[in-house]
Image: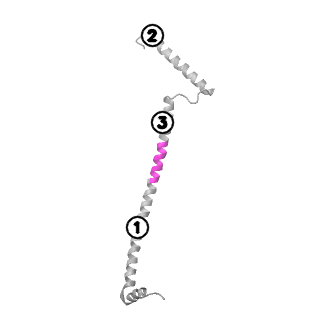
């Protein structure tokens, strides 16, 4: 078990000391003399769990935002194609309006001062 004869008694003394400190801290917390428990492995574990939960929530929100961004980009690309098609159609209509004798008369009428 132990290699030295006094080692067991020192371990017991240390455990009793830690037990007294924890009991005093619990009494202080229960009586309202302490605001929060001292930092330790339990508080760190709770903090880590809280951070992990926050990370998971933020990762989910990021994934949703990325999906929304992809949808918006696809919609934007569709609108750009539609605008290009409309510009081409307007160019064709403009060319047809300006072509031939009727186009010449139309341009001439626009140059004349209005009465």
Magenta stretch? 54-65
Decide whether residue 49 is among the magenta residues. no
- In the picture, the disc for residue 95 is none
To which residue does mark 1 refer? 80
To which residue does mark 2 refer? 6
Q: Position of residue 68 (x, y in %)?
A: 46, 56
Horizontal arrangement in the rendering, residue 28 relative to residue 111 (left or right): right
Number of marks in picture: 3
Q: Are marks 3 and 1 in contact (CB under 8 Å)?
A: no
Which numbered mark, 3 or 1, is in the foreground of this view?
Answer: 1
Residue at left offset 47%, top offset 52%? 64
| Disc 2: CA contacts within 10 A as few (<14), some (14-19) or many (>=20) | few
Q: Are marks 3 and 2 in contact (CB under 8 Å)?
A: no
To which residue does mark 3 refer? 48
Q: Position of residue 52 (x, y in %)?
A: 47, 40
Using the numbered discs, state the Cα–Cα distance from disc 3 to disc 2 in whole angstroms: 39 Å
Residue at left offset 47%, top offset 15%? 11
Q: Work out whether 109 lies above or below 79.
A: below
Q: Position of residue 53 (x, y in %)?
A: 49, 41
Q: Work out whether 111 lies above or below 36.
A: below
Q: Is the N terminus in the top left, top right, bottom left or bottom right quadrant?
A: top left
Which numbered mark, 1 or 2, is in the foreground of this view?
Answer: 1
- Please, what secondary structure does the residue beneath circle 2 have? loop
Nearer the N terminus, badge 1 or badge 2?
2
Q: Position of residue 78 (x, y in %)?
A: 42, 66
């Amino acid at each position: 078990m132990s290699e030295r004869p006094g080692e067991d008694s020192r371990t017991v003394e240390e455990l009793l000391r830690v037990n007294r400190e924890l009991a005093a801290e619990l009494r202080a917390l229960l009586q309202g003399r302490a605001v929060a428990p001292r930092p330790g492995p339990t508080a760190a574990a709770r903090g880590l769990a809280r951070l992990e939960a926050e990370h998971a929530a933020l990762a989910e929100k990021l994934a949703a935002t990325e999906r929304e961004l992809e949808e918006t980009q696809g919609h934007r690309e569709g609108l750009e194609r539609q605008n290009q098609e409309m510009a081409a159609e307007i160019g064709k209509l403009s060319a047809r309006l300006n072509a031939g004798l009727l186009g010449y008369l139309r341009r001439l009428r626009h140059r004349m001062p209005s009465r």
